[in-house]
Amino acid sequence: MADQEMEVMNDRDGLGVGEDVIGDRPKRYQRRRSGNGLPDYLDWKNVDLLRNFVPERGKIMPRRISGITAKDQRRLAKAIKRARSMAMLPFVAD
Amino acid sequence: MAKRTYEVMYIVNPDTDADKIEKLNEAVGKLIEKEGGEVVRMDDIGIRNLAYPIQKKTTGHYVLFEVDGSGQEILELERRMRVNDLIIRFVTVRVDEDRKKADKIRAKRDARLEKRASFRASKNEQRDSAEEQAEG
């Protein structure tokens, strides 16, 4: 039984479902979610869209949480950084 | 020289008079035309809150230009913006490449959807004709 549980936890690449251990309580996350891709042309001035990927603290949301593709994450990071340089998004918020 | 498209955005000190800002925008437009560029779009966004203070100010007057040109006018424009006291922040972004990429992706997707739709239609036709034969 214990072996089976271990198996589930290590199944990161198989089913695309895994556990992320932050602190002592593991948080569940899904590897791929459909329907929340970025638009073909990501406008760095579209602050409302970018805000979805910037949590309260002002950091860029990791791919692990946002579930977007690596390519989109790179585009997103660039757009957020451009918006930051023009004071449309914070570098740090506290 | 290859034609490129740029977005130039700058933040003007919010304490300046409206007519002074208008004059500044006019001067920017004229400079671009003089250097061989073309102003596609000029957008005076107006006063917006800044996400963090710049030069102890919490608001700024945003102005956006969209410019077609070779890049030469951007060079000159940036040099002048750097020494202008009214402009507290500016950025230039080249957008034509990303737009072209986006168009390509869109075209690809449309083509695929169309292909799928036509395939589905032909399949339905086949099934319909088969059913008719079975009935007859």
Image (cartoon, coloured by chain):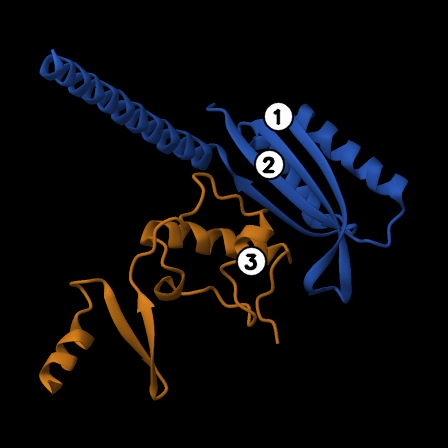
Q: Are marks 1 and 2 in contact (CB under 8 Å)?
A: yes
- Chain of the residue where label 3 is placed in the rendered structure: A
Q: Secondary structure at mark 2?
A: helix
Inter-mark Cα distance, 3 to 1: 33 Å
Distance from Cα at disc 2 to Cα at disc 3: 29 Å
* Chain ID of residue with mark 2: B
Between the residue at mark 1 and the residue at mark 2, the CA separation in whole angstroms equals 9 Å
Mark 3 and mark 1 residues within 8 Å of each other at the beta carbon: no
Mark drawn on residue B37:
1
The verdict on a common chain for dots 2 and 3 is no
Task: Kindly identify the residue that appears in the image at 56 percent across and 27 percent down.
Answer: B69
Q: Amino acid at mark 2?
A: Ile
The chain shown in orange is which? A
Q: In the picture, residue A84 is in which quadrant?
A: bottom right
Q: Disc number at residue B74?
A: 2
Chain B: its colour in the image is blue
The answer to whether A19 is drawn above or below residue B2 in the figure is below
Left/right placement of residue B42 relative to residue B66 reads right
Name above or below for residue B19 compared with residue B131.
below
Determine the residue positioned at 46% across, 33% down.
B99
In front: A46, or B28? A46
Front of the two marks 2 and 3: 3
Q: Quadrant of the N terminus of chain A?
A: bottom left
Which one is in front, A29 or B98?
A: A29
Q: Few, some or many C-alpha atoms within 10 Å of disc 3 (few <14, some 14-19, many ≥20)?
A: some
Q: Label 3: which residue?
A: A51
Q: Residue furthest top?
A: B136
**Residue A29 location in percent, x, y?**
33, 69
